[in-house]
Amino acid sequence: NAGVTQTPKFRILKIGQSMTLQCAQDMNHNYMYWYRQDPGMGLKLIYYSVGAGITDKGEVPNGYNVSRSTTEDFPLRLELAAPSQTSVYFCASSPRSSGYEQYFGPGTRLTVT
Amino acid sequence: DQQVKQNSPSLSVQEGRISILNCDYTNSMFDYFLWYKKYPAEGPTFLISISSIKDKNEDGRFTVFLNKSAKHLSLHIVPSQPGDSAVYFCAASVRDKVIFGPGTSLSVIP
């Protein structure tokens, strides 16, 4: 049981490049989330999904896209990377919504230069 | 507009003493409040939660108190241990969304 896995661990992108951050969970959780954490700040919700085929915007969705074709996977796509997207990205999953604990992956540290 | 606030960026406490971490919120629609702990280079891990209809929840050394009229909650750690040194995030949920505070860095001094 690996829990929530994220790849890659680190990545450096040039301005304007695109990439996909991968997230997978093996706990059969319906709910999945993407957060970003900037230095000295809390976690900001980017996108979330309540089940396969269903996604919705969080607090800071601009510049990102997601898809949820399976229960296990929830990739985050960055199009036209900008320096403002330099951050640590965390994926999380939960068996239920509202108040139930989320299980977090180890994070992806992304630098855009 | 910051809906979940943790006004103390850092806190230092002697080992064995009580640590009190505070959190304020603005949205009265939040139905659950959670605390997460985060070590460097790791993802956050869940610590304890409380429903908005309760005023206290206890789990071992950790107790969370909720004051709905003041829109304030606090996490008490007794006794504090060096392994508790981490960043603590307060979070609040409404329907499918969870909003996190900026975190408080706790240092427990041996």
Image: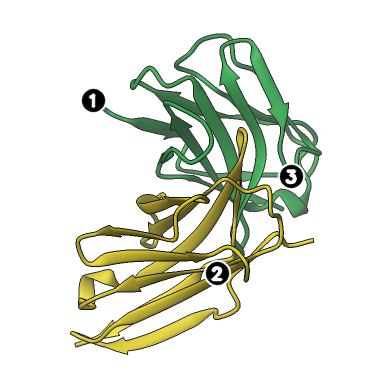
* Subunit bearing disc 1: A
Q: Residue at x 22, y 67 (%)?
A: B61
> Alpha carbon of mark 3 to alpha carbon of mark 2: how far?
20 Å
| Tags 1 and 3 touching, CB below 8 Å | no
Q: How many marks?
A: 3
Residue type highlighted by circle 3: Glu
Residue picked out by circle 3? A59
Pointer 1 residue:
A1
Q: Which chain is green?
A: A
The residue under the point 58% across, 63% down is B68
The type of residue carrying mark 1 is Asn
> On residue B72, which mark appears?
none
Q: Nearer the viewer, mark 3 or mark 2?
A: 2
Q: Are marks 3 and 2 on the same chain?
A: no
Q: Nearer the viewer, mark 1 or mark 3?
A: 3
Q: Residue under circle 2?
A: B23
Position of the C terminus of chain B, as image quadrant, is bottom left
In the rendered image, which quarter contains the N terminus of chain B?
Answer: bottom right
Subunit that carries the residue with mark 2: B
Q: Chain of mark 3?
A: A
Colour of chain B in the rendered structure image: yellow
Query: Do pointers 1 and 2 mark residues of a single chain?
Result: no
